[in-house]
Image (cartoon, helix red, strand yellow):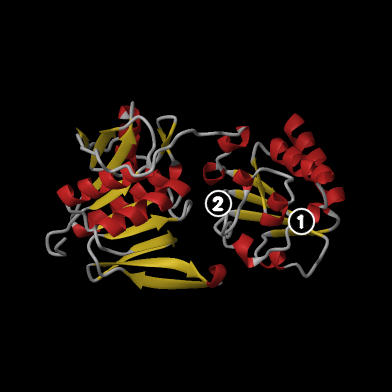
Amino acid sequence: MSHSDAKNIMVYVETVSDTPLNGGLEILTKAHKLASARGEEVIAVFVGSNLEHAASTAIMAGADKVILVTKDNYEMEVYGAVLTKLAEKYKPSLILSAGTLMGKDILPLVAGNLSTGCAVDVMEITDKDGNFVFTCPVYGGTVLNDLMIHGTPAVAAVRSGAFEKELVVERTGEIIKEPVDFKDTVRAKIVEVVKEMAETVNLEEAQVIVSGGRGMGNKENFKLVEELALACHGVVGATRPAIEAEWVPRSHQVGQSGKIVAPKLYIACGISGATQHVSGMIGSGYIVAVNKDEDAPIFDIADVGIVGDVVKVVPLLIEEIKKIQSL
């Protein structure tokens, strides 16, 4: 695609139960600011069914146009082909998506189809002399690196919580139903999908996350994390050791090999603060850590640190929270 022909920003917005995820809406708000400064438009893309309400929300978040493509079931290759064909037709200079598991599946396919580069885990996007600059963490999140993609369009998966969502009811936009032929694009056939109850957890969207680590000791003690999360109306998270010990299903894992999260409140229970875990939750608004080791690295990033036996401290936290809620 010629760089001179490319303009506008295309954002793929993922949905769950016909509702757009916050990650996509956050990106639309950022894209609107970037596009407005360049005198361009934001094009939101939805793939699924019954998405008219989601399209209206996307317009409030910053989309000037919303493209709806009807597809009943998720198939990675089909979604990748749809975005590729839309990119070839609308010629955007930038394609964005939330860095969810689905987003990280689809965007590399699109970048490969368009012979361009793809940045992942993006935390900031700036416009420098007409070129997009992406800020991404490297070396386990200890260093932030700025990079540019010289191919067109640039493709990037954005970390959830990197930007603030702003919904403006007065915004107006155009909704387009786009027929896309995705025949002969599927090479893998999904024979059966087996879901466990825990798959319903949505860490990326949670406002409060209570996570437990190796320091919880055993599966029985880990139930304290679940009780604290329930008291805080939050979601349960976990480190990799807790997952491997089978104290909680893998869908709850936070970190480099799990989910990247940015809740308003993150409570770390019995978590030492290894780089692999911290890089997945460093964007949290407020961090509370409970650990018996006063030299644990988690205290270096915590807003509030409690040094003590987590098995004794967490029940006290639960008790106090319940007292406050009963007032």
The residue singled out by tag 1 in the image is 214
- SS for dot 2: loop
**Which residue is the extreme one toward the left?**
5
Q: Nearer the viewer, residue 98 or 308?
A: 98
Q: Nearer the viewer, residue 111 or 95?
A: 111
| Residue 308 figure quarter | bottom right
Q: Residues within 10 Å of mark 1 (few under 14, many from 20)?
A: many
Residue 144, image x and y in percent? 48, 71
| Residue 203 figure quarter | top right
Q: Residues within 10 Å of mark 2 (few under 14, many from 20)?
A: many
36 lies above or below 322: below
Residue 219, image x and y in percent? 80, 45
Q: Nearer the viewer, residue 196 or 209?
A: 196
Residue 281, image x and y in percent? 59, 56
Residue 216, image x and y in percent? 80, 52
Tell me the CA gap for discs 2 and 1: 18 Å
Q: Amino acid at mark 2?
A: Lys
The residue singled out by tag 2 in the image is 259
Q: Which label's residue is closer to the chain start, 2 or 1?
A: 1
Q: Are marks 2 and 1 in contact (CB under 8 Å)?
A: no
- SS for dot 1: helix
282 lies above or below 186: below
Q: Residue at x 33, y 39 (%)?
A: 58
Q: Amino acid at mark 1?
A: Arg
For residue 321, side relative to residue 70 (left or right): right
Is any part of residue 212 visible from this angle? Answer: no
Q: Quadrant of the N terminus?
A: bottom left
